[in-house]
Amino acid sequence: MKKLFLSVIGMYFTMLAALSQGNPKTDSAYKPRKLTFEEANLVSSYYRQDGNNSAVTGGIGSEKLTDLSNSIDLKVYRYDKRFRKHSFIGELGIDHYTSASSDKIDPHTISSASHADTRFYPSLSWTMENENKGSTIGAGLSLSTEFDYSSFGFNINFSKKTKNKSGEFGAKLQAYLDRVSLIYPIELRTGGGGGEDYDYATTPRNTYSLDLSWSQIINQRLQVMLDGEVVYQKGYLGLPFHRVYFDDNSLHIENLPSDRLKIPLSIRANYFISDKFILRTWYRFYHDDWNINSNTLQLETVVKFTPFLSVTPFYRLYQQTAAKSFAPYRVHTAADTYYTSNYDLSKFNSNFFGAGFRIAPPNGVLKIQHLNALELRYGHYQKTNGMNSDIISLNLKFK
Amino acid sequence: MNSARSYAKSFFYIPAFIAAVLYINSCTPVKEYQKNKLNDAEMKLSSRKVEKTELNFQSYREGASGANGGKTGGGCGCN
């Protein structure tokens, strides 16, 4: 926790140092060749959840979990000799969570896989925008590491605007090369072992995705975006400490197929109703070859009290069918090839609702010149199987 | 019961259908100086920065993910 606190302080001072460089005098024609600060964002969230269907204990037991998340990103840019804009974004994120269910992996110790753990996830990205041609190319790298999981990701992306700049095509290729530590429930371990210093074997889980999007201005008040993605995962897609109890009360480890193809398709439409109201909508249809089909609809209404102060109530409705390998506690049989009692893969509906508050005065929030905007958002989430959670998030934007 | 279900399902397809119809029939050229409403910070065609952790927990707690700028891989989210 001390390390986490020091890291957050470190991130804050890094941001202050960047801001202390100051912004150069700019006008619309000025194209700085030196690296120039553009913006920085600090996003902090507190999340808590509860429920009684933990996968660690075979679909029964506490899902109580808290997560404190902090991330900071810093964006700088420069123009090259051909007046192409190069943007560089560095991001560092730190999550610290405590989980009641993870502590049940080895209930005899308090050092099981991750009854409490910290995840670090730095990333770097670069884009080069040719404003004359309306095209952008970019690439990025990311890392994520926690006690029982590590991930290395990279991506390349491309976008191109239409001649009249009312439409834009985007494409993004991503790959994540992950390693899962094989930490089994204490009853199923052979040869002993355990604890934070134990060298667990690992196994790969790789994810590859292609995302294609088209955004279009419809008229002076309406713009839409269509987004389609194909995601292919291969490797160990279950988790080694998810217990499954068969109908004869025998204990097994979750066993899922070693590959998965996901196809999400979404449409986003934002409509500027008036100077006081903006409607933001998002719908997604999802299908995968584990038999999960899902629909998601999110509606937000931005209510502007002044041009710089707004409140945004939102509602999100989600429904999904069950994966073919899912069954509750003590329902699977020895005849099943694949089995899990993870309720995240069960059939359920969920409701998520709350509100956001945003303030972005021209002379800075609280008259702090560089503090360009403050956004606070709270949401309550409830699944039909009883799991519920709350999340509160803060975004401070510095320019 | 089945008709109620199919009605509920069709409810989800309506926004997509309306948006598609608007897209096909209503595109009108918008000049740069006419984009002041479209350039409003709240009109961005992406998730908000402040939604970052929301998108993460939804991808962990639900079977579906993707096509929203959230994560589709990387990081465990297993608890």
Image: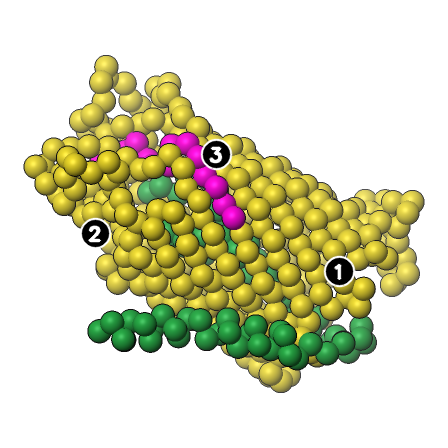
Chain colours: A yellow, B green
Dot 1 crowding, Cα within 10 Å, few <14, some 14–19, many 20+: some
Q: Which residues are magenta?
A: A230-243
The dot on residue A188 is none
| The C terminus of chain A: image quadrant | bottom right
Q: Nearer the viewer, residue A103 or A236?
A: A236
Q: Is residue A337 above or below residue B32?
A: above
Disc 3 target residue: A206
Circle 2 — which element? loop
- Dot 2 amino acid type: Asn
Please identify the residue farthest to the left as the structure is shown.
A248
- Dot 3 amino acid type: Asn
Counting residues from the start of the chain, the first of labels 2 and 3 encountered is: 2
Q: Could you tell whether A138 is left or right of A116 in the image? A: right
| The N terminus of chain A: image quadrant | top left
Disc 2 target residue: A52
Same chain for labels 1 and 3? Say yes or no. yes
Disc 1 target residue: A161
Dot 3 crowding, Cα within 10 Å, few <14, some 14–19, many 20+: many
> Could you say where residue B58 lies in the image, as x and y percent from the top left?
41, 54
